[in-house]
Every structure is written in structure tokens, then in C-alpha cells.
Image (spheres, grey):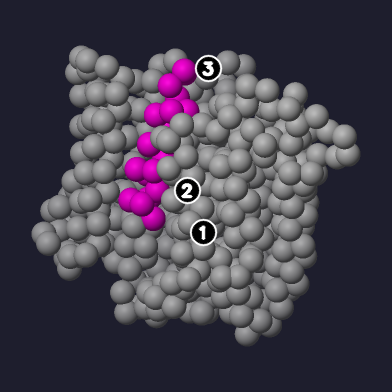
Amino acid sequence: MSEKLLMLPIILPAFFASVIPAIKFNSVRTRNIFIESCIILNSFIIFMLLIFPPENTLMLFRFSEKAAFALRLDGLGMMFAGLIAVLWPLTTLYAFEYMSHEHNQTSFFGWFIVTYGVVAGIAFSSDLLTLYLFYEVMTLTTLPLVMHEMDGRARYAGRKYLIYSVGGASCAFIALTYAMSQGAGEIFILGGSLHLIYRENLNMFLAAWFLGFIGFGVKAAVFPFHGWLPSASVAPTPVTALLHAVAVVKAGIFAIIRLTWYVFEPESLAGTWAQVLAFGMVCITIIYGSSMALATQHLKRRFAYSTISQLSYILIGVLILTPEGLSAALMHLGAHAIMKINLFFCAGAILCQTKREYLFDMRGIFVGMPKTSIALLISGLALCGLPPSAGFMGKWQLGTAAAAVNIGHVGVAVLMISAVLTVLYIFSIFSIFIMPGKNFDFKTANEGVKDPGSKMLIPLGILAAGSFIYGLYADVLIKFFSDISNGIL
């Protein structure tokens, strides 16, 4: 296919979002069909680009001789684009029912669609400058979604999200400026394009990479720059599901992979203070996130802290700086997206149907919402690593890759501790739902409580099944991710 088609999944969402306010829909159902059709069309175009990938780079314009705004599709971009193309239509369908009683739905869905195009731009970015620009635009398009309710909590969460994002952008900009000044190529190259010149000043090279890691690590919720993520749980669940499972946090991981593996040379980073310091931060984040998840009674916040921990699982694979580690990181990146977005969907379904946010108010809710509870049970078991689930395959690949290098031994120990904590904070939810205690009045507790409608249950069922289908077809996925990490794709 022509490389010019790479522009379509980026431009079309902005066009669709702009025409929604101008169209006088006969009914909400008609509007929803139009929005879902736009999302599915964008996903279809992305899938066509993945099946018939363009070979050339689309050069849109140049800022200078060394700085260009360009698009290109390689193996890593294919993986990220495919992930959003699968999950965005499901989230949109879920959002129709969840947002049915909310205000400003036109504004919500407008920003929701625009963000799809911006995240596609991140996936298709040809170089660090283009990625950085799309990355920062994503902050602006997701901010109205975080602040959708416009009450005190939403405004506070929005300010916090913006402050953290601007701080991260400043650090990432230093890494970008250094890379461009040292002649980083216009096209991402696996193995890095700064490998010949770093020896002029090794500490400057390492400091620039580390600042970039911190900058992009803000979106990836690396401790102590994680504070925005639990606060963002006040946003509508379709937003938090995308923020915490796909769009924002995975974009942070994606950017760190690009910076580490496609701009700075991994071999030059291995064994340095920068790698050790970043790896230590990631290990602390894993334990901290898992511990806070266990201690938190607010269900969406529990899953938010779980996300903080699980994201750093992925970064362990990235930071051990081996192709096997990168392949394992990509394996768990996809697995976590499928599992965690469904857990947020389940929490949102409970909130939508019962207005209950805290676990102590959800005792015995399995009786009233059995379908939602089963979907949460399946995805929760996958997150715990039950074979042959997505979570098991991701953790197995990470543990195997980490055990092969010296620094990875600490990571393996941290993963094992976190695995125990994950079992505790997931199974405590099950016990509250199913076994609330002796002489508990299930009838009174579930009065008026029922599962949501099909628009919410269909995504829950598909993603719950996907949590194990992903693991059952792991061989195919491992081959695909290995090809990416070895430069074949």
C-alpha cells in the first residue's frame, strides 16, 4: 500500500469528531451507530495497513535539515497500532451504555475519537521528534476526558495530570534535543543510531537517556512520578480504561522502547549507572504498586495501582537490554492491555449499575451481577498468571529473559514478590463478591442490582475470553515479537 495512506487513521478521526456537532441525529441510537462506524472504519484502515504495510517513509515536512515530521510503519508500530485498533471499538461500544446518563456526550465522544487518531500517530511516527509531538498532543486531547465531570475532583485530577505531563515533557525534550544534536537518524533503527558518537562524552550520553526515561516514564507511572494515575480514576470508566490500559500509559512504554532501543544504543547503556538506576526505580515501582493495590479499598484505584505495578513488569523486560527481554516486554504489554482494560470495564459496570465504588459496599454482589463478576474473575485469574492465560505467558517470558542476565536476578525476585501480592489483592475481591461472611443477607444487598445491558456485556465477554485466547496462541505471538526484537520486522 502507498505510504500516503498512513495519514488516514490520523486525519479521519479529527474529521469525524468535527462533523458530529454539525449533524442533527434523529436519535441517540443513530448517533451511536455513526460513531461506532467511524471507529470501526479507522480500525479497518489500520488493519489493512498492517496486512499490506507500506515500505517507504512518508515525509510530510521538514523543520530543518535534521528535523522532519514523518510517518513510517515498522514492526513495533504494527504491534501498537494493532492493539489500539482492536480495543478502541470495544471501548466505544462500552461507552455508549456507560455514558448514556452523562452530560456533554457530544464533547466526550469528540475528544474520544480525536485521541484515537493521535495515538495512531504515535504508532506510525518515523522518528523521535514526530513521536514527541504526537505524544504531547495526546496530553491535550486526553485532558478534557479526564476533566469531563468538571467537578472539584475532576478539575484537581486534570491539573495534576497536566502538571505531571508538562514536567515529563520537559525531561523528554532534553533527550530529544541531545539526540538531534548528535545526529540521530530521521528513521527509527533497531539498535540505536547514536552508537558511533556517544564515546565523546559518556556521562552526557547516559544523562540524556536517563532524562528521557524519566520524561516518558511519567506517562508509564514510574515511581515517584506515578501520582497522576490514581487521581485520574475520577474520569468516566471508558476514559480510565484507555488511560490505564492502552492509550496513555502504553504510549509511555512505547516511547521508552523507542528511546532505548531505536535511538540510544542498548549495548552502550548496559552495565552503566543509568541502567542500574532506572532498573532500581522500576523494581521499587513494582513492589509499591502491588502493595498499594492490596491496601486500597476503592476498586478502580486498586486497579490503577495494579497498573502502576504491571507497567513496570514490562519495563523490566525493556531495561535488561536483550532481544529476549524486549520480546518478553512486548508479550506482556499486549497481555496487560487486554486483561486490565476488562478489569476496569467490570469496575465501571458495577459503578454504573450500583453507584458503589468501595469493596466493602460490594459484598455479595456476585448474586446480583453474576455475568460481570465472572468476567472480572476470568480476567483477574489471568492477571494472577493462571496458565495458560495471557498473564502467565507474559510473566513466564519476562522471568525467563530476566534470569539470563545478572541484573535481571533482582527483577525475578521482585516479580515473584509482586506475583504473591497480585494473588492477594485479586482474590480478596473474589472473596468479597462471593463469600461476604456468615449470615449475610444476599437479598437485601442485591436489591435492584443487576448486570448491565449488552453494550457493556459484549466487550466484557470478548475481553475475558481474550485473556486466555492470547495465551493459547502464544507461540504465534512470541514469534511475532521475536521478529520485532531481532529487527526482522
Q: CB of mark 2 within 8 Å of CB of mark 3?
A: no
- The circle on residue 461 is 2
Q: Could you say where residue 371 lies in the image, as x and y percent from the top left?
A: 56, 42
Q: Could you say where residue 414 lies in the image, as x and y percent from the top left?
A: 74, 67
**Residue stretch rendered in magenta on the structure:** 83-102
In the displayed image of the protein, which residue is found farthest to the left?
2
Mark 2 vs mark 1: give the one in front.
2
Residue 353 placement, left or right of 474:
right
Q: Secondary structure at mark 3?
A: loop
Looking at the magenta stretch, what is its main secondary structure?
Answer: helix
At a point 58% along the width and 16% down the height, the residue shown is 151
Point out the tag, 3 or 1, that comes first from the N-terminus: 3
Compare residues 160 and 129 and report the one nearer the observer: 160
Compare residues 466 and 481 and report the one nearer the observer: 466
* Real-space CA distance between mark 2 and mark 1, rounded to the nearest whole angstrom: 10 Å
Residue type (three-letter) at the residue carrying disc 1: Ser
At a point 43% along the width and 21% down the height, the residue shown is 100
* Real-space CA distance between mark 3 and mark 1, rounded to the nearest whole angstrom: 34 Å
> Can residue 171 be seen from the camera position used here?
no
